[in-house]
Amino acid sequence: MTEIQNPPRASFASFEESTKEDWALIMSQRDELEASLPTRVLEQMEHLRNDYGGFPIDRLEHSVQAATRAERDGRDDEYVLCALLHDIGDPLAPYNHPDVAAAILKPFVSSANHWMVQQHGIFQGYYFWHHLGMDRNTRDRFAGHQHYDYCEEFCALYDGPAFDPTYVSNPLEHYEPLIRQFLGTNPTSRLA
């Protein structure tokens, strides 16, 4: 039987005790962590499969339906990625799921797309919050924001209508190259 060798680890018990050598060791293993991000995101997307939460379709179908609608409308790849991942945080953070998706996407997308994903929860409330005794116009607190119309359009065209059980969406596998393209590269290399 072959024994699995664990990679070397730093020796400190607190950051105050850490050394330059510890951090060189940690950073030498960082590439593996960053390179595996697309795989971890795909795994999280699978958690949306068969998670209906009372909706007509599961959360994964909602996500791929939103992405498919955006793609078929000719939106660019970054926008389609945002449409795909906008609800990835639902199972982990049901009270603030847009923040989870926005945090994942922030290093990889424009400020407009980041803001759209981060605020979509409030903007989608326009369509149903009044049924729950809430103020459907809560999004109006952002009136005048440079990305208000952009987010409003996302909810109207892609998020809100993406609950149709008869719609034929692309499968998640169709979007795997897109996820790997955006999340598999160091975002700072694109900024240079």
Image: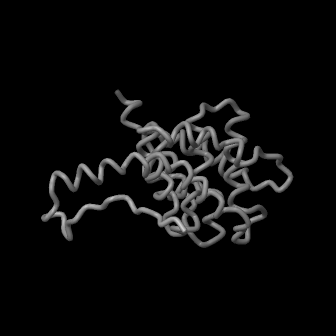
Q: Position of residue 122 (x, y in %)?
A: 52, 57
Q: In which quarter of the image is the N terminus?
A: bottom right
Q: Where is residue 138 in the image (x, y as percent from the top left)?
A: 50, 58
Q: Where is residue 89 in the image (x, y as percent from the top left)?
A: 54, 61
Query: Is residue 180 or residue 55 the one in the foreground?
Result: 180
Query: In this figure, what is the number of numbered marks?
Result: 0
Q: Residue at x 56, y 44 (%)?
A: 82
Q: Residue at x 62, y 57 (%)?
A: 45
Q: Which residue is drawn at 49% across and 50% down?
A: 37
Residue 146, visible in the rendered structure: no
Q: Residue at x 21, y 56 (%)?
A: 22
Q: Looking at the image, which residue sits at the far front? A: 1
Whether 21 is drawn above or below 150: the answer is: below
Task: Tell me: 1 left or right of 51.
Answer: left
Query: Is residue 3 or residue 33 the one in the foreground?
Result: 3
Task: Tell me: 56 left or right of 98.
Answer: right
Query: Is residue 88 or residue 116 the one in the foreground?
Result: 88
Task: Tell me: 192 left or right of 12.
Answer: right
Whether 54 is drawn above or below 57: the answer is: below
